[in-house]
Image (cartoon, coloured by chain):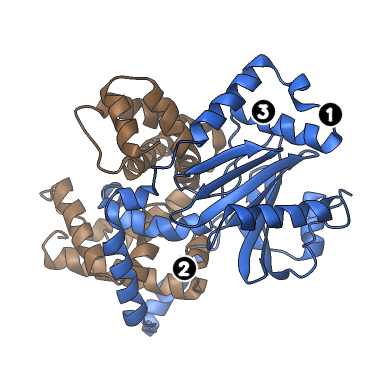
Amino acid sequence: MMSEKLIKAIGDIDERFILEADKDRVKHAVITPIKRNVYKSVAAAACIALVGVGALSTMSKNDRFEMKEMASEAAPAAEPKMSMIASGNTTTTAAMEDAAEILMEEELPTEGAMEAINDTAATVATVINPMRGVTFAQMTEELHLKVTLPEGAAENNRYIYDLGDEKLGEVNFAYDGKEYSLRVQKTEELSDIAGLYYTFDVDDTAKGTWLRLCTSEQVGSISWYNNEYTYCLIMTQDASRDALENMYGLVMDALHGKMINKE
Amino acid sequence: MEDKLIVDLYVARNEQAIEESQKKYNTYLMTVATNILFNREDSEESVNDTYMSAWNMIPPHLPECLKTFLAKLTRSKAIDIYRGKHAAKRGEGGFDLVLEELEEVISDDGAVSDNMEYEELVSEINAFLEKQKAEARKLFVMRYFYMDPLKDCAAYLGMSEAKAKSMLFRMRADLKDRLLKEGYVI
């Protein structure tokens, strides 16, 4: 079938175009959680910190070794950069984006074209879209969890991502001039639900949290595990250790107060 | 770990190459596969096949960008798996919808010339994309490379679904015109 030839050919397009589009996808990526054994250590530490039991006493020798390995990997890893920059296409991409902003305009299709569009639309309408806007009440019902923001935070929107049998909740909000996303998903262990495809030069696990930062792009996340849920606070602009840890503190304060109460 | 170092591991036939690729790109590749397959097991299979192919291809191939190299492999593997499992008839997954949309470009009554080399077609698509405005180009890649659902494409680019549909429609028509002018569609 000729359209298959075309679709395969599109699979071999110039990588510049793929990376260019990827940059926008990254900001909104939906992640299928991965379960890596190494995170068990972090999950264990998170639970232990919360219930006040000595962490090392419950971790296996292997876990301790993995934690040690992670720490030693994270500390000296200052050289990696976002893969897009490493590919040397950043300037081109930025220039193309600037040009697009100036040139982009909407043209209405002709009547005949509209018919074709409507046909396509009818087909496209059946696409399974994993992301949908929800209200606070809907999110609470679907996640079995109340995700309330700290006082002073301005909520922008809420989404549920349908990932097969699993659901991921996301609340986007602003606080003190900075933008955050808080993601929550029921998982068996701490999982990567951040949706960030950067090379992180900071990758720390401490005090039950897992903090990652790409300092050159000012993107980062802090994740933790509590009571069968992975939580992940994400910043895609102006991310810093201080900003993430401060907001994590606010969220955790609320966790023990009124913000997140399992129903 | 930097891509270059991971590629060096492949070249050195060090199995840590696969481990590092997994660590860095597994979630990304899973999203590429899942968009096509809508099935976790099949997606995992295609991603695992990707690492094996990368192991077999590097060296002699030395990808300049490991991320897109792996993404292209995953996409291709996922399409093969999808085709293998849906050989008899079309399903209702995202892949088939994308395929239907692209049939407007190369329909059975206006098929691509058999003489057209695959490389020529890729080159024409690249040239076509190069001429597009950045927003349109991104939309095209999201929809037809990543096979993201239309609603997601629109959300990624901060536009309405109607606008995304309209832009894609125009691009498909433009691509068809281009292929016609170049004599690739007969």
Mark 1 on the same chain as mark 2: no
* Tag 3–tag 2 contact (CB < 8 Å): no
Q: CA distance from mark 1 to mark 3?
A: 14 Å
Amino acid type assigned to the residue bearing label 3 in the image: Ser
The circle on residue B157 is 2
Quarter of the image for the N terminus of chain B: give it: top left
Amino acid type assigned to the residue bearing label 1 in the image: Val
Q: CA distance from mark 1 to mark 2?
A: 47 Å
Mark 1 or mark 2, which is nearer to you?
1
Q: Residue furthest top?
A: A61
Which chain shows up in brown? Answer: B
Q: Which residue is mark 1?
A: A53
Residue A6 seen: no
SS assignment at label 1 = loop
Residue A36 seen: yes
SS assignment at label 2 = loop
Q: CA distance from mark 3 to mark 2?
A: 38 Å
Q: Nearer the viewer, residue B16 or B48?
A: B16
Q: Nearer the viewer, residue A58 or B145?
A: A58
Horizontal side of residue A52 vs B92, given as left or right = right
Identified at 56% across, 36% down, the residue is: B40
Q: Earlier in the sequence, mark 1 or mark 3?
A: 3
Chain A colour?
blue
